[in-house]
Amino acid sequence: MCQGCHGETGMSMAPNFPHLAGQYQRYIERQVRDYQTAKRADPIMSGMAAGVTDPQDLKDIAAYYASQKRVIGKPGSDKNLTAKGRKIYFEGNMEAGVYACSNCHGEKGDGKDAKNNVFPVISGQPKEYLLKQMNDFKTGERRNDPAGMMGAIAKKMTEAEINAVIEFTSGM
């Protein structure tokens, strides 16, 4: 069922679905469990997640996608927007209380480590998907981040800052 949206090798062909290839196994498992318990909501994913009833099946699915080759992003076409996004990604915006994305998502947008189930690989993800996630965190529609960390940061970001970070991150 997963490959219908996320692709056989975890490379989604649709811009509104995340690439799962190379994502951390424990992060994938946690997200599916969050859909199952309604900590995270999406009409399609919640239904799909409900179909994964065997814990070993979830581990196997997540391990499969984690083992696939991760996507390499294509640099954005807007050089100024990419440069602004790079600055925010690595330095944040201390005046607004926006911490650098790299603090949690790593220097290369690849999260922290394989044991991590909190900080996902975000580099190379589709722009449309990243934008929806940032806006969902900003509005509070998505609340499955530890201690509301992403929501608090997204709320402090302007639309222009979010777009800049996405332009940079999707091209990493």
Image (cartoon, grey):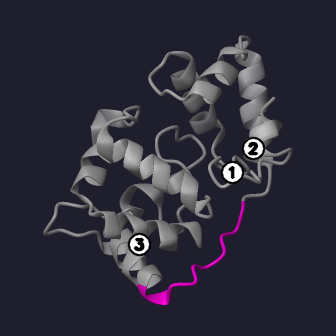
Task: Report if the CB atoms under discs 1 and 2 are less than 8 Å apart.
Answer: yes
Task: Report if the CB atoms under discs 1 and 3 are less than 8 Å apart.
Answer: no
Inter-mark Cα distance, 3 to 2: 25 Å
Disc 1 element: loop
The residue positioned 30% from the left and 52% from the top of the image is: 154
Q: Which mark is residue 6?
A: 2
Q: Nearer the viewer, residue 141 or 114?
A: 141
Q: Which residue is mark 3?
A: 164
The residue positioned 40% from the left and 35% from the top of the image is: 142
State which region is magenta.
Answer: 71-80
The answer to whether residue 13 is left or right of residue 144 is right
- Residue 53 % position (x, y): 71, 11
Task: Report if the CB atoms under discs 3 and 2 are less than 8 Å apart.
Answer: no
Viewport quadrant of the N terminus:
top right
The residue positioned 30% from the left and 73% from the top of the image is: 91
Residue 7's place in the image compared with 103, above or below, is above
- Residue 28 % position (x, y): 62, 36
Residue type at mark 1 is His
- Residue 102 % position (x, y): 41, 64
> Based on the displayed image, in which of its 4 quarters is residue 26 positioned?
top right
Q: Which residue is mark 1?
A: 19
Residue 158's place in the image compared with 57, above or below, is below
Residue type at mark 3 is Ala
Residue type at mark 2 is His
